[in-house]
Amino acid sequence: MDGPPADARAIEEEVLAAIRPDPATRDRLEAARRHLLARAEAAAREIGSPVVRCLVAGSAARGTYLRDRMDIDLFLLFPPPLPRDDFERAGLALARAILPRGEMRYAEHPYLRGEFEGFAVEAVPGYAVEDSARPQSAVDRTPFHQAYVTERLTPEGADQVRLSKQFLRALGVYGSDARTGGFSGYLIELLLLRFGSFRALLTAARSWRIPVTLLTAPKAPPRLPETVALVLDDPVDPERNVASALSRRNLALFVLAAGAYLDRPVRAAFEIPPPRPLDRRGALERVAERGTHVEVLALDRPDVVDDILFPQLRKAERGLVEEAERLGFCVVGSAAAADPRRAVLVIEVEHPRLPAVKVQDGPPAGLDRVDSFLQKWGAPDAPVLQGPYVTADGRLAVEVRRRERDLGPLLTEALVRLPLGRDLKRTLPAETRLRPLPETEEEPVLAAALADLLEKRLPWLGARGSPRASGAADPTA
């Protein structure tokens, strides 16, 4: 197979030089890894912890980390018979002994995030299971993942993983957390083991059609939920889809970016674009230009982590859109955003107000219900604007006056029954209402949501009106 063109090879070598840790940094990380494990074992003895094994895994152990992302994942593995409550208590006690100033975080169960010898460390409890296909917690497969990748990934392969990670970072689709819905580090490693190189992965991906199925053994593909984007079975647990967190939107973005880079390799493909929040004034100008209407629902953020909050935010966003469409509004777009204090949902419609008239469908001619429909709507004093009459498809209908016609009040009224997510709904004040964009106050989280709503554009095309430069900015900035 021919190698990459000279310009692509030069770009990729330059990017690798910027993102690959230098020998001194690698040595410092390796020393911290050894010291952390020694500290974990000593702490376990000091407090009499029932832990079976302490393990550093992930990119810090496999050598696939980037120069500016060198977190250390420490797994504290306990005996499988340990009851869940005891497991959580013992896990946190040991984590606290290792990272006394660590901050509590929550995923499937609590863990700690802190600092050790200048590196960010996550101390995560798990079970030391013997069968990777029978985990008792979400992280129990980690030692098996570690062994599988370490045995197969060469130093050259690790560089190809780094290159792929940086490419996905620039697209904003690196990370399997609920906020991102992108590619996990393990998924990227498996893809590189399968395809062999960054360019080979892009070459395959440019022709993918979603949903994509990449099975490691010949068998019938599983029945897929409608939202699944990519299926890649976990080599240590074939019943698990490694790519379950990846959204269709993010996979489609990667597919398009793969083709764009192969056709025209540019350094900008690896550069992380700066955030482009859209302030209220700019958004109002954009909405006026578009001739649309935007409503805003702003909430105090519930006290939950991103992995719990963002699925609820997306559920609430879908609920608002579906209710607006059910009412008869033409929805142009929607978006959601959150920061440590606030959460915001925005919805854009073609017109903010429905017509005064609403068609009320009745039964087809010949059914028994025709008589009751005519009794209700055919009386001289019935509150109708027109009808009853027969429609082209043979049904009865009347036209009535809408009680409420404006989007904001209609959606506000529906909030109590919409599926907004448990934590969002629990913290929703009774006086909460949607507000038109001109009535809202400037705040960073609103600017982020408005950018997602009104600044949608393929990232490699740059800002509207000016092609994105391919300059030599630091891709890790």
Image (cartoon, rainbow, N blue to C red):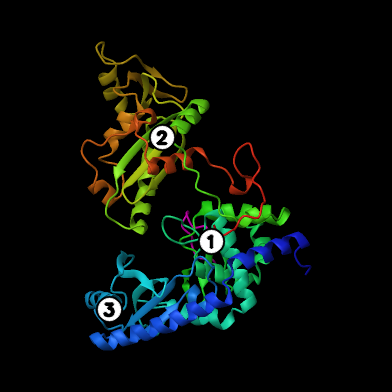
Magenta stretch, residue numbers: 219-230
Question: Nearer the observer, disc 3 or disc 2?
Answer: 3
How many angstroms separate mark 1 from mark 2 (CA)? 29 Å
Q: Is residue 220 visible?
A: no
User: Quick one: which residue is furthest to the left in this view?
Assistant: 430
Q: Which residue is mark 1?
A: 230
Image quadrant occupied by the N terminus? bottom right
Quadrant of the image occupied by residue 210: bottom right
Q: Secondary structure at mark 1?
A: strand
Name the N-terminal-most of marks 1 and 3. 3
How many angstroms separate mark 3 from mark 2 (CA)? 54 Å
- How far across and down, in percent of the image, does residue 105 sit? 31, 65
Q: Secondary structure at mark 3?
A: helix
Q: Is residue 339 above or below residue 334?
A: below
> Which residue occupies the foreground of this view, 13 or 438?
13
Q: Is residue 221 magenta?
A: yes
- How far across and down, in percent of the image, does residue 268 sit? 64, 53
What type is the residue that disc 2 sits on? Glu
- How far across and down, in percent of the image, does residue 21 sit? 56, 72
Name the N-terminal-most of marks 3 and 2. 3
> Which residue occupies the foreground of this view, 33 or 424?
33
Contact? badges 3 and 2 (CB < 8 Å): no
Question: Nearer the observer, disc 1 or disc 3?
Answer: 3
Quadrant of the image occupied by residue 403: top left
What type is the residue that disc 1 sits on? Leu
> Which residue occupies the foreground of this view, 219 or 86?
86
Residue 325: mark: 2
Image quadrant occupied by the C terminus? bottom right
Q: Secondary structure at mark 2?
A: helix
Could you classify mark 1 by the number of other residues whose Cα lies within 10 Å: few (under 14), some (14-19), or many (20 or more)? many
Could you classify mark 3 by the number of other residues whose Cα lies within 10 Å: few (under 14), some (14-19), or many (20 or more)? some
